[in-house]
């Protein structure tokens, strides 16, 4: 396996960014809870440790601390922001409240380059985000860079390969930040830049074969990016030992079931079993308007249907594994740690085990990858662009895009309208430039005029947003002529709709989905 860097998480909003930047430099990174024992890191053979930033102050009682033995294992340590202050504090230095906090851009003046700043300019624009600063260095440390309000903006102890920086090299706002990280990885930790998707595929295929042996695997295929890439990777490893289950819940987009069957059965020769249970889902949703109740009904019914399919499959074959498209952020976010300062610690639907009655072991071939890496993996495996770069689609499907109680005739109106929006976005070369573009069915009717006749029909809302990670989003400024085309086509081609409106809310305060 490739050389690995451990990133200890102290709750920074940038922890995952640090890990991704390391991987962009072709070195494997893994995020560990700050409570991880030094012995664990040593046993896993990491080449170096990065202490992330975090919202706490080292001066606060109960602020998070790592195992102090990490400073006695002999491998390099890089502290970023809170990580630098923490290292200085734990090794005998002093941290104080700064009279001038540093948030945003600052000028880093490098006084001694050494390995960390090798081949870099003497001044850099960097991004700061801190209220404390080091006021006294630990024994053996020296300052090698300053900012306007911090005489110890970067410090080092070359005899132990300990480094600390007050700024954030991982964010795009910091000039040459990637170069600084590269110097730490290559010149200080002596990592080989061998992490690549081709090497990951080779390693994963062997791991899957070793884990599965001659047994069989079941995978719930949604047609989304994660399950599609997981299916393609597992199929490449074990071929016909994989069976995919696609549940038609009656809340799919236009021709979704047919498209999934055509792609995976014909193009990839996958064994895809389709459970057509639309009537069951819709009967249980009858009269339900509360969004959370809808989600619970859809989720619970899915589990019931999937469990029934799994039970029947197990009777007909030696199935021992259930495969899931769990990603690395899912795993990170689902770690429950007492006192972890991170704001986002939750139980994820893909993490935490399986119902005991299934009696299946989990197979999660993507659990070390970020979303962008999954897309790269999909490209390497030959998945088409429309799968690899498919926009996110909610698990409950159109069930949360029909406002109010769900009726079959309303779903048909929404499906046709949504298909038109998708088609126009593709034709306009805009589909792959935005985060999401979809239609919402509103539970209101308005008066219209068509062919000199009065109409009283439904309203469709268009939602098109730009985002990086769905945590925040803004409405996309789509050209008026494109919006006009979408509106005209929906009103003219979709029976039952006489008005189209545009959602121009941002997140926050609104959410991307309406329910």
Image: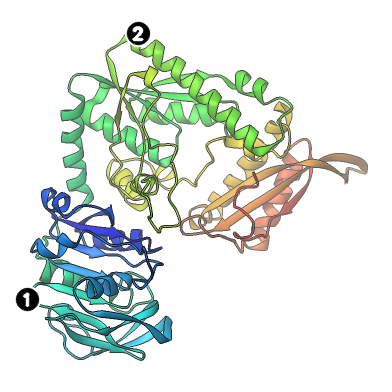
Counting from the top left corner in percent of width and height, residue 403 is at 71, 40
Q: Position of residue 491 (x, y in %)?
A: 76, 44
Q: How is the image coloured?
A: rainbow
Q: Residue drawn 28% across and 78% down?
A: 176
Residue that extends furthest to the top in the rendered view of this protein: 315
Q: Is residue 472 above or below residue 293?
A: below
SS class, disc 2: helix
Residue at point 74% right, 27% down? Answer: 287
Whether 138 is drawn above or below 300: the answer is below
Nearer the observer: mark 1 or 2; the answer is 1
Q: List x then y, in percent, for residue 51.
A: 26, 65
- In front: 75, or 297? 75
**Lateral position of residue 226 relative to residue 367, left or right:** right
Q: Residue at x 25, y 25 (%)?
A: 239
The answer to whether residue 248 is seen in the rendering is no
Report the front residue among 421 and 338.
Answer: 338
**Residue 151 sits in quarter:** bottom left
| Residue named by callout 1 | 159
- Which quarter of the rendering shows the C terminus? top right
- Secondary structure under tag 1 reads loop
| Cβ atoms at labels 1 and 2 below 8 Å apart | no
* Number of marks in the rendered image: 2
Mark 2 burial class by Cα count in 10 Å: few <14, some 14-19, many 20+: few
Q: Earlier in the sequence, mark 1 or mark 2?
A: 1
**Which image quarter: residue 24?**
bottom left
Please indicate whether residue 319 sits to the left or right of residue 425 in the image: left
Crowding near pointer 1: few (<14 within 10 Å), some, many (20+)?
few
- The residue tagged 2 is 315
């Amino acid at each position: 396996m490739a050389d690995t860097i451990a990133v200890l998480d102290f709750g920074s909003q940038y922890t995952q960014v640090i890990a991704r930047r390391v991987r962009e430099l072709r070195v494997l990174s893994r995020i560990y809870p700050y409570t991880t024992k030094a012995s664990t890191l040593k046993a896993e053979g990491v080449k170096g440790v990065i202490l992330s930033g975090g919202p706490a102050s080292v001066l606060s009682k109960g602020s998070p601390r790592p195992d102090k033995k990490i400073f006695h294992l002999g491998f390099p340590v890089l502290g970023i922001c809170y990580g630098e202050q923490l290292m200085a504090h734990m090794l005998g230095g002093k941290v104080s409240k700064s009279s001038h906090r540093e948030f945003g851009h600052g000028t880093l003046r490098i006084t001694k380059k050494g390995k960390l700043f090798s081949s870099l300019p003497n001044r850099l624009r960097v991004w700061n985000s801190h209220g404390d600063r080091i006021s006294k260095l630990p024994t053996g440390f020296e300052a090698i860079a300053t900012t306007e309000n911090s005489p110890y903006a970067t410090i080092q102890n070359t005899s132990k390969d300990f480094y600390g920086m007050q700024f954030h090299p991982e964010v795009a706002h910091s000039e040459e930040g990637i170069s600084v990280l590269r110097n730490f990885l290559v010149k200080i930790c002596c990592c080989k830049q061998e992490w690549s998707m081709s090497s990951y595929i080779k390693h994963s295929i062997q791991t899957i074969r070793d884990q599965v042996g001659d047994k069989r695997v079941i995978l719930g295929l949604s047609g989304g990016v994660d399950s599609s890439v997981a299916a393609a990777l597992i199929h490449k490893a074990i071929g016909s030992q994989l069976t995919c289950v696609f549940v038609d819940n009656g809340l799919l987009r236009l021709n979704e079931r047919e498209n999934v069957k055509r792609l995976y059965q014909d193009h990839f020769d996958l064994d895809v079993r389709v459970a057509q249970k639309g009537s069951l889902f819709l009967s249980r949703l009858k009269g339900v308007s509360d969004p959370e109740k809808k989600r619970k009904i859809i989720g619970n019914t899915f589990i019931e249907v999937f469990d029934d399919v799994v039970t029947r499959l197990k009777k007909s074959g030696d199935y021992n594994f259930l495969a899931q498209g769990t990603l690395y952020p899912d795993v990170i976010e689902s770690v429950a740690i007492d006192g972890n300062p991170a704001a986002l610690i939750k139980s994820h639907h893909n993490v935490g085990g399986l119902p005991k009655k299934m009696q299946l072991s989990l197979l999660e071939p993507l659990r070390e990858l970020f979303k962008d890496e999954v897309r790269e993996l999909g490209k390497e495996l030959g998945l088409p662009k429309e799968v690899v770069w498919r926009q996110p689609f909610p698990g409950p499907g159109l069930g949360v895009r029909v406002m109010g109680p769900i009726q079959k005739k309303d779903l048909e109106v929404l499906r046709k309208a949504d298909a038109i929006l998708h088609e126009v976005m593709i034709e306009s070369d805009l589909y792959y430039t935005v985060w999401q573009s979809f239609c919402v069915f509103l539970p209101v009717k308005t008066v219209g005029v068509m062919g000199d006749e009065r109409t009283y029909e439904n309203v469709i809302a268009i939602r098109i947003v730009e985002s990086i990670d769905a945590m925040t989003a803004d409405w996309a400024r789509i050209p008026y002529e494109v919006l006009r085309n979408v509106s005209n086509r929906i009103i003219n081609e979709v029976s039952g709709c006489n008005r189209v409106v545009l959602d121009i809310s941002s997140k926050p305060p609104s959410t991307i989905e309406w329910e």
